[in-house]
């Protein structure tokens, strides 16, 4: 576009600035227009070069009237004006190469008219060389328009003729048959050769057929039937917003009985479904943050009962020529006694133009109905609407509109405040009730620095007052397809260019508690979720004047941000209705869902997560039970709050117990059936209850005698004081039990046994100490290692932790295997535990038993996989594309292993970053689901036998005994003993400061390529983990000549000085990787080499790099 605008032989056909010389300033002007445009189109040649460009906005291109009042201006000054905000856009800019000017303009306007069903007119004031596309509008006799202005109009029917809709006749069969031959094989395979003729010939009062005629040819066909099984649809879909597709009846039961019995409220299956935000497009339900699972189940169990007659007819078959698909027609006049029109579409069929006028009915999570249901009300055929400022006179109408909503009181209170106090002139009513107010400067700066909002807008082209915060949006569901036009009108009339809508997590008091409690439910899917940006942990005191502003650095409540603007509001996403079911809320599963949800131009309507405890991150941050397990640092509480996956993902609480591959459904908790098109297994591995070996300690056995049958899974009833911790919910349950049963007040002498040899044993011991349990009551029992690599893999750290355990009074038992546990008088409690060692056994009194000794695939998960005949070889077998032996089932994470044909049995997904694995899994799925054309690449021969190379680092961190804050960042791969790695000739360089026992230990490994590929931190004081993670993979020269300064003795403390200096803030910036890539490309270009005279000084380039990073974001500090 820049070359097009700066070229010499172009024609400016229609622009407000048509007297300006075409130069680089014109390119800046075009960039400004495209940023604020409702629609921008570029016409390219076969070589993908731009030959024409046009920009359309929803207000006139000359400043002859206010943008919010142009409709009345046109009606007063022009004759036969049928232009409305719903069907009109104005061309503000159109440029084209001189030789193609006329043809390009016609092609652009023609394409514009095909963008939407409702955009019918293009207007433009003044212009030349437009006669072939536009026609002049007649000025009214009393017009006040200056003679210099000429209003040009291009109605849609000039490019897309209107269709004449009539009843189908047998003589139309040949034309319709021609349309039929272009359909896909799935549709043609379901019908016989004479199916079309039968539909036309068998018309009666219940079966109708219509054609859309252009000229003398039928170009569209629609078959209608008034017989609809509404009872079946009510069982499978949430039809509450449409009154169950039935006529109102006095005996309808629409609300939950006042006092439901306990049996009516509880699901017998033990599985509960929690719908995402789209579930009720017109009827919002309020799930409070304190709601228990039982309360959610009660609301999910109730379904309205409708006694009235059917009020719907269905479209059995719809065909239309591709050239006329934007003229898709809906026939409601043939069946006058029905208000709703429904159509069923297979899940894998992309949405077509006709469907854009329908409302998607949300299926229940457990619905096995094989198609998507779309609903249209005859009232949705309106051709115009009026959006205006609200007044106090609109209160009764808004009250009627919101009376069925659980948030109606809050909405009405806010409405009264805005209309009475009149703090903001931007309040809307009529069919939509919305409250809108401007964002203050601090909020926009915070959004800009904490969210990747500049992926959607350029802040430099938007005034401060043009950013708005959307508070409420309520829309009658039968007008759901007008949502984006209401949003467009809100922006125009309020003189806004961008809207923002935050969603706070459940645990935030005083805010809407869940996405289901939001009044924006019907508009949320017309906005885009904005990815959060990784934040720098700033050492504010050290930075001094270089520190960022308080608006950027201060902590605020985390929330998920949704956004729309002028150029996004008419940009339709590609809806994917494919049913994707994810099993397991592991880091891999969450990363997979995150990638799909934030994919820019796709909208996934059928994402479902099956998890034992639902979505993670729903507990308040800082809960005391969070320290029991080691942290992978893939996602933290703030990440979960800023993603708000519950807004986009259905959650089924329960455990997968079987898979029916033939019928394509998953059984949850042995009862509920969740259907899928693609099943993604990310269940991972969990700590299991170990089975005692059963050795008789009276016979003084040793480990050598029992190792052959160890470890095994315990199959009996698990005692209530035995704990295997796998997630935060397990930790919370254990912490609550300890507070109630093992506190010094209740049981001052009971022992707590921690059994295992993973790093989780140390974090659990520290958590027990923090709960007030005396160290003398804690026994740490470690079984023999299965490999030579210890969990910390660092002798200095192990010595410091061992000393801390001794100082705390914790007893440590080495190389001990569980032989027996005794239950005493209460069979539900472990009262003592016996262990064998390499010498003689011992026995401990026990009040609570924590086991981390046996980690493998959960038995019920294994049984479901094995019974489904999926290949299982110790783990679920996959190929390099995450595929199992079933093309519809994918898997990833520690649950899986590669097929033996790759000869890499020791390499699994456990050796790589879970977050990266989840992203790559989503990318492989997107190649199947995203219909956007992409350049294809042919893989080299033999690469299908190689496993993928992943580069993300493996991270683990937590608080160890003694209050030591621990972080270990390692390259992906098979772990080796540290002392053996140090002995390698090509090991690289070790940089270590401080001592572990002193609590200031910092170790960095620089490999033979001078890249950082290992970091270990062990400190008494908390440190910025997110900052240090950014150091991984960086060249040591980027770290301020780290190796040179270390060799010169200039670095004595990596904690308090070196990595807290101002220069290091550039490394921690989230866009630093992009900057490096841009600089790398610039350095290898011919232009840079010539400018540098063929020689570039490396140190000089680094100074340029660190200086340039300050331009990345307003949050970037200044550098010395």
Image: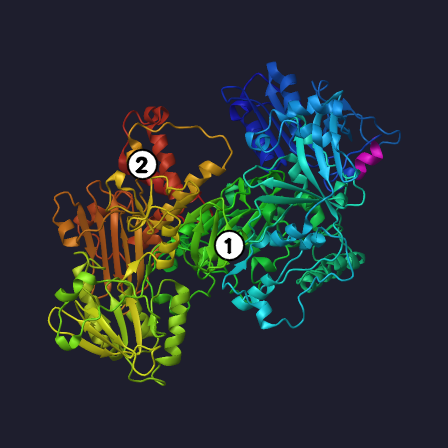
Instruction: Tell me the quarter of the picture where residue 133 sits.
Output: top right
Local packing at callout 2 (Cα closer than 10 Å; few below 14, some 14-19, many 20+) is few
Q: In the image, is residue 792 above or below residue 1084?
A: below
Residue 475 visible in image: no
Q: In the image, is residue 237 above or below residue 322?
A: below
Q: Which one is closest to the eye, mark 1 or mark 2?
A: 1
Of helix, strand and loop, which mostly describes the magenta segment? Answer: helix
Measured from the top left, where is residue 919 in percent x and y? 40, 45
List the residue tagged with mark 1.
Answer: 673
- Mark 2 element type: helix
Viewer-nearest residue: 686 or 246: 246
Residue range in magenta is 72-78
Q: CA distance from mark 1 to mark 2?
A: 60 Å
**Which numbered tag is attached to residue 1101?**
2
The answer to if 73 sits in the magenta stretch is yes
Q: In the image, is residue 458 above or below residue 822?
A: above
Residue furthest to the right: 141
The answer to if 697 sits in the magenta stretch is no
Q: In the image, is residue 645 above or below residue 1010?
A: below
Viewer-nearest residue: 89 or 344: 344
Viewer-nearest residue: 133 or 748: 748
Measured from the top left, where is residue 900 in percent x and y? 26, 41
Which numbered disc, 1 or 2, marks the residue that appears first in the sequence?
1
Name the side, left or right, on which 813 lies relative to 246. Answer: left
Local packing at callout 1 (Cα closer than 10 Å; few below 14, some 14-19, many 20+) is many
Measured from the top left, where is residue 236 in percent x and y? 61, 52
Instruction: Tell me the quarter of the picture where residue 285 sits.
Output: bottom right
Name the side, left or right, on which 475 lies relative to 1046. Answer: right
**Which numbered tag is attached to residue 705?**
none
Name the side, left or right, on which 214 lies relative to 369. Answer: right
Measured from the top left, where is residue 1070 in percent x and y? 40, 47
């Amino acid at each position: 576009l820049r070359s097009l605008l700066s070229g010499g032989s172009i024609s400016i056909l229609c622009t407000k600035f048509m007297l300006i010389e075409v130069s680089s300033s014109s390119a800046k002007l075009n960039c400004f227009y495209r940023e604020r445009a409702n629609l921008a189109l570029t016409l390219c040649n076969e070589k993908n070069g731009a030959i024409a460009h046009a920009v359309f906005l929803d207000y006139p291109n000359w400043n002859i009237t206010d943008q919010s009042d142009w409709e009345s201006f046109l009606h007063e000054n022009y004759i036969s004006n049928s232009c409305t905000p719903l069907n009109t856009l104005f061309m503000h800019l159109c440029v084209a190469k001189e030789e193609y000017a006329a043809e390009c303009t016609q092609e652009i306007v023609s394409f514009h008219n095909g963008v939407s069903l409702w955009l019918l007119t293009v207007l433009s004031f003044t212009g030349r060389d437009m006669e072939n596309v536009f026609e002049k509008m007649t000025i009214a006799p009393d017009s006040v328009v200056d003679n210099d202005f000429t209003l040009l109009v291009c109605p849609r029917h000039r490019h897309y003729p209107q269709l004449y809709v009539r009843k189908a006749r047998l003589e139309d069969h040949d034309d319709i048959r021609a349309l039929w031959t272009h359909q896909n094989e799935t549709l043609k395979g379901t019908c016989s050769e004479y199916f079309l003729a039968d539909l036309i010939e068998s018309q009666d009062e219940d079966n109708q057929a219509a054609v859309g005629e252009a000229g003398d040819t039928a170009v569209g066909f629609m078959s209608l039937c008034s017989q609809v099984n509404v009872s079946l649809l009510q069982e499978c879909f949430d039809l509450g917003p449409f009154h169950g597709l039935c006529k109102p009846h006095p005996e309808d039961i629409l609300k939950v009985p006042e006092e439901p019995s306990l049996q009516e409220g509880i699901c017998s299956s033990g599985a509960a479904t929690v719908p995402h935000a789209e579930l009720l497009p017109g009827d919002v339900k309020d799930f409070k943050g304190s709601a228990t699972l039982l309360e959610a189940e009660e609301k999910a169990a109730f379904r309205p009962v409708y006694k009235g007659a059917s009020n719907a007819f269905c479209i059995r078959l719809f065909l239309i020529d591709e050239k006329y698909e934007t003229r898709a027609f809906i026939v409601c006049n043939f069946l006058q006694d029905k208000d709703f029109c429904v159509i069923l579409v297979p899940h894998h069929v992309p949405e077509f133009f006709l469907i854009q006028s329908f409302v998607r009915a949300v299926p229940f999570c457990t619905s096995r109905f094989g198609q998507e249901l779309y609903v249209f009300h005859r009232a949705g055929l309106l051709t115009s609407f009026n959006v205006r400022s609200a007044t106090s006179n609109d209160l009764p109408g808004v009250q009627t509109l919101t009376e069925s909503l659980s948030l109606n009181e809050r909405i009405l209170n806010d409405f009264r405040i805005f209309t009475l106090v009149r703090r903001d002139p931007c309040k809307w009513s009529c069919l939509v009730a919305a409250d809108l107010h401007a964002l203050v400067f601090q909020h926009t700066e915070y959004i800009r620095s904490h969210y990747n909002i500049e992926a959607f807008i350029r802040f430099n082209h938007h005034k401060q007052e043009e950013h708005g915060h959307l508070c409420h949006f309520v829309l009658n569901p039968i007008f759901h397809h007008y949502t984006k036009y209401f949003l467009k009108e809100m922006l125009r009339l309020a003189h806004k260019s961008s809207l923002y809508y935050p969603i706070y997590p459940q645990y935030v008091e005083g805010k809407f508690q869940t996405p289901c409690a939001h009044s924006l439910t019907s508009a949320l899917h017309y906005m885009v979720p904005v990815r959060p940006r990784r934040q720098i942990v700033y050492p504010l005191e050290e930075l001094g004047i270089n520190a960022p502003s308080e608006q950027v650095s201060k902590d605020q409540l985390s929330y998920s941000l949704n956004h729309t603007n002028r150029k996004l509001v008419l940009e339709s996403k590609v809806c994917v209705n494919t049913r994707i079911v994810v099993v397991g809320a592991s880091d891999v599963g969450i990363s997979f869902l995150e990638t799909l949800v934030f994919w820019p131009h796709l909208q996934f309507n059928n994402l479902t997560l099956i998890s034992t405890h639902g979505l993670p991150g729903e507990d308040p941050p800082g809960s005391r039970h969070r320290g029991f397990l080691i942290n992978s640092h893939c996602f933290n509480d703030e990440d979960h709050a800023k993603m708000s996956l519950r807004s986009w993902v259905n959650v089924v609480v329960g455990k997968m117990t079987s898979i029916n591959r033939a019928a394509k459904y998953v059984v949850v908790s042995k009862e509920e059936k969740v259907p899928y098109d693609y099943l993604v297994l990310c269940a991972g591995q969990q700590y299991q209850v170990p089975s005692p070996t059963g050795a008789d300690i009276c016979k003084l056995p040793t480990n050598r005698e029992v190792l052959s049958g160890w470890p095994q899974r315990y199959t009996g009833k698990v005692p209530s004081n035995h704990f295997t911790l796998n997630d935060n919910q397990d930790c919370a349950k254990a912490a609550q039990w300890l507070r109630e049963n093992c506190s010094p007040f209740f049981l001052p002498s009971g022992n707590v046994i921690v059994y295992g040899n993973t790093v989780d044993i140390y974090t659990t011991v520290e958590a027990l100490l923090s709960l007030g349990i005396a160290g003398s009551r804690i026994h740490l029992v470690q079984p023999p290692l299965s490999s030579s690599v210890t969990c910390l893999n660092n002798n200095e750290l192990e010595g410091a932790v061992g000393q801390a355990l001794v100082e705390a009074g914790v007893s440590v038992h080495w190389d001990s295997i569980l032989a027996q546990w005794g239950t005493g008088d209460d069979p539900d409690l472990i009262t003592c535990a016996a262990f064998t060692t390499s010498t003689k056994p011992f026995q401990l009194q026990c009040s609570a038993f924590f086991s981390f000794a046996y980690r493998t695939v959960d038995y019920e998960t294994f049984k479901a996989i094995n019974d489904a005949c999926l290949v299982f070889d110790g783990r679920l077998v996959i190929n390099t594309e995450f595929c199992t032996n079933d093309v519809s089932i994918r898997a990833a994470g520690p649950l899986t292993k590669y097929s033996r044909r790759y000869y890499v049995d020791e390499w699994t997904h456990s050796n790589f970053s879970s977050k990266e694995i989840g992203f790559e899994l989503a990318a492989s799925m997107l190649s199947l689901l995203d219909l956007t054309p992409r350049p294809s690449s042919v893989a080299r021969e033999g690469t299908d036998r190689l496993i993928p190379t992943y580069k993300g680092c493996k991270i683990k961190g937590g608080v160890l005994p003694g209050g030591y804050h621990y972080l270990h960042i390692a390259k992906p791969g098979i772990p080796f003993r540290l002392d053996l790695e140090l002995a390698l000739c090509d090991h690289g360089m070790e940089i270590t400061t401080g001592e572990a026992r002193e609590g200031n230990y910092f170790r960095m490994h620089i490999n033979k390529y001078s890249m950082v590929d290992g970091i270990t931190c062990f400190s008494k004081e908390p440190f910025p983990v997110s900052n240090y993670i950014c150091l991984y993979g960086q060249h040591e020269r980027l770290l301020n000549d780290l190796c040179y300064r270390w060799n010169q003795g200039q670095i004595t403390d990596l904690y308090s000085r070196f990595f807290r200096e101002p220069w290091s803030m550039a490394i921690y910036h989230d866009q630093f990787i992009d900057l490096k890539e841009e600089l790398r490309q610039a350095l290898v270009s011919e232009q840079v080499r010539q400018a540098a005279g063929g020689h570039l000084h490396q140190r000089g380039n680094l100074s340029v790099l660190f200086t340039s990073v300050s331009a990345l974001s307003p949050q970037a500090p200044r550098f010395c």
